[in-house]
Image: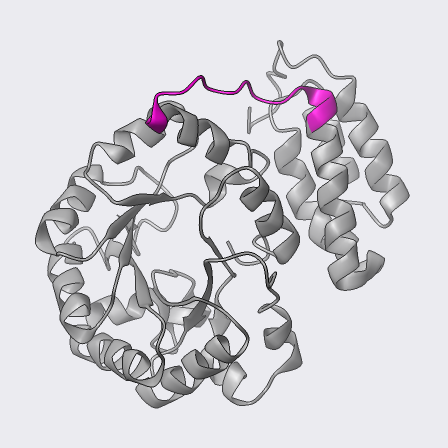
Amino acid sequence: MAGNTNLAYRRMCRDFGAELTTTEMVSAMALRHGDDKTLNYLERDEDKSPDAAQVFGADPEVLAEAAQKVVARGFDVVDLNIGCPVPKITGGGGGSALLQNPDGAAACVAAMSASVDVPVTVKIRAGWSDDNKNAPEFARCMEQAGAQAITVHGRTREQKYTGRADLDLIARVVEAVSIPVIGNGDVVDLESGKRMAETGVAGIAIGRGALGRPWLFEQLHAAFRGEQIPDSPSLATRSQLLLDLGRGVCELYGEHRGMRIMRRLATDFFRGLRGAPAMRKDSNALTSLADLEGLATRIAVQDDSHPDPRDPDA
């Protein structure tokens, strides 16, 4: 979710009922050195709680310092990323590389827990590879080290984002520990959300499934409460949400950088619509809010009852 979960997007998800939002992961070492770009990722709304910040690293002392800096900025939860599969993260021993080093990971969690008074949580994957799906055992180790909740993405590091999330394994993690387990992976609609809930998890973490569809949180809440499920917003509303997001991103980062960020985020709002391939091309060339307004107008007049068969993301 790096590059996607900026404060503007998290605000929109909260407006649609997300109960806890988390920053994109930040480097513990960069926090130690006071890197301005990294500190900018730790933007938060003071009136929105609970709010979590996610850090990565593999050095217990550095992670403990990072946890203190996160709490000093007002966050309610510190989350340690042990799930990222990207080589530049795992190459330094962080992210999902820690799945191969349970003792090292436990030392990190213990140091972080001892350094702050807020909950320290952990995000993991099913395991490093299909031959080593050690999530249940690893989760017990994290609980013993002081983690107060654990999020499990049902894919291995080897899978990255291919294949399907292993819901049976997530259910085994639920059985293995007494702390809350949050399920993650492939929740993109009501049916997939219900399947995840059947694993017995205490909560559901949604990342890619909410991109371009922040109303999914509202719909899932209604489904789990037995209430009438709100309809997905009209294309006119969807185009307005895109504009609202773009304006919020520009307030945070300025129009030039904001539009570079929106080149990625905008595409999720018109996936599957007729004309999506052409709109994606225009999205990749966004340079101003005026460009985004033009794109939003094109979304508002689409007919979403006939997906474009040429769109590979439909």
* Left or right: 223 in relation to 127: right
Classify 63 as above or below 214: below
Q: Give the percent coordinates (x, y) of residue 247.
A: 78, 48
Classify 139 as above or below 74: above
Q: Total of numbered circles in the picture?
A: 0
Residue positioned 61% across, 36% down in the render: 268
Is any part of residue 4 visible from this angle? yes
Q: Give the percent coordinates (x, y) of residue 45.
A: 61, 60
Residue positioned 52% across, 82% down in the render: 31
Looking at the picture, tell me which residue is in the foreground, 66 or 136.
66
Classify 139 as above or below 275: below
Q: Give the percent coordinates (x, y) of residue 167.
A: 22, 38
> Is residue 226 in the magenta section?
yes
Q: How is the image coloured?
A: one colour
Q: Give the percent coordinates (x, y) of residue 276.
A: 69, 26
Is any part of residue 132 visible from this angle? no
For the view shown, which residue lies furthest in the top direction?
305
Residue positioned 45% across, 58% down in the render: 50
- Residue 94, located in which quarter of the rendered image? bottom left
- Residue 101, located in which quarter of the rendered image? bottom left
Looking at the picture, tell me which residue is in the foreground, 272 or 184.
184
For the view shown, which residue lies furthest in the right direction?
290
> Is residue 303 in the magenta section?
no
Q: Magenta span: helix, strand or loop, mainly? A: loop
* Left or right: 108 in relation to 289: left
- Residue 239, located in which quarter of the rendered image? top right
Q: Quadrant of the C terminus?
A: top right
Q: Which residues are magenta?
A: 224-237
* Left or right: 27 in relation to 204: right
